[in-house]
Image (cartoon, rainbow, N blue to C red):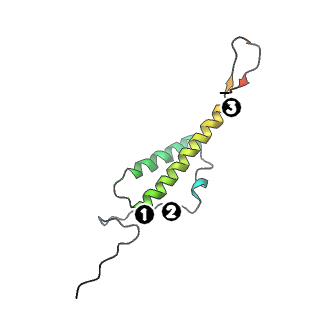
C-alpha cells in the first residue's frame, strides 16, 4: 500500500530549512508609526535584504513586502514634514523673517 503524501509544515521550506514568517501582532500600518527616519530606513533596508532571500515562502514574502511598504511610507511622511518645515530666506529682503517653503 503506498504511503500518503507528506504535507509540509507552515514555515518550512522545500529544503527543510525553517523560515519563520514575521510575527506581527500589530497592524502593518502601526509598526512604523513612532519610528524616526533613520529607524524606518534601516528597517526598510532589512526587509528588502530579506525579500531578496530565495528561501522565503510566499506568505513570508507577502508579510515582508507589507512591512517594507509601511517603512517606506513612514520615510516619505517624515521627509514631507521636513519639507514643510524648511524655511526660505529671500536674499532681496534680508531683514524679513524666513517664510515657509511653498512648492
Task: Decide if residue 27 is on the left or right side of residue 8.
Answer: right
Label 1, label 2: how far apart the Cα atoms are: 8 Å
Answer with the quarter of the image where residue 96 lies. top right
Q: Residue at x 59, y 43 (%)?
A: 36
Q: Is residue 98 above or below residue 93?
A: below
Left or right: 62 with respect to 53?
A: right
Circle 1/circle 2 CB separation < 8 Å: yes
Q: Position of residue 97 (x, y in %)?
A: 76, 20
Residue depicted at x 59% and y 47%: 35
Q: Could you give the CA–CA distance between mark 3 and mark 1, rounded to whole angstroms?
A: 41 Å
How packed mark 2 is, by other alpha carbons closer than 10 Å (few <14, some 14-19, many 20 or more), is: few
Res. 26 image quadrant: bottom right
Q: Which mark is residue 23?
A: 2
Figure quadrant of the C terminus: top right
Density class for disc 1 (Cα within 10 Å; few <14, some 14-19, many ≥20) is some
Q: Please give the label number shown on residue 46.
A: none
Work out how far the residue at label 2 is from the one at label 3, CA to CA, in angstroms: 36 Å
- The first of marks 2 and 3 along the sequence is 2
The tally of labels here is 3
Looking at marks 3 and 1 on the same chain, the residue that comes earlier in the sequence is marked by 1
> Residue 39: image x %, image y %?
54, 44
Q: Where 96 falls versus 58 (above or below)? A: above
Which image quarter holds the N terminus? bottom left
Q: Which residue is mark 3?
A: 85
Query: Measuring 62% from the left and 50% from the top, which residue is drawn there?
Result: 33
Residue at image point 69% right, 19% down: 89
Residue 29 percent location from the top left of the image: 59, 54
Q: Secondary structure at mark 1?
A: loop
Q: Secondary structure at mark 3?
A: helix
Q: Which mark is residue 20?
A: 1
Whether residue 76 is situated above or below residue 1 in the rendered picture: above
Amino acid at each position: 500500500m503506498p504511503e500518503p503524501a507528506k504535507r509540509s509544515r507552515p514555515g518550512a521550506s522545500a529544503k527543510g530549512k525553517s523560515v519563520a514568517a514575521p510575527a506581527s501582532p500589530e497592524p502593518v500600518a502601526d509598526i512604523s508609526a513612532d519610528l524616526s527616519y533613520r529607524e524606518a530606513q534601516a528597517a526598510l533596508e532589512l526587509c528588502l535584504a530579506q525579500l531578496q532571500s530565495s528561501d522565503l515562502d510566499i506568505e513570508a514574502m507577502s508579510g515582508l513586502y507589507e512591512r517594507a511598504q509601511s517603512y517606506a511610507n513612514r520615510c516619505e511622511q517624515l521627509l514631507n514634514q521636513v519639507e514643510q518645515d524648511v524655511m526660505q530666506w529671500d536674499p532681496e529682503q534680508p531683514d524679513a523673517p524666513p517664510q515657509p517653503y511653498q512648492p
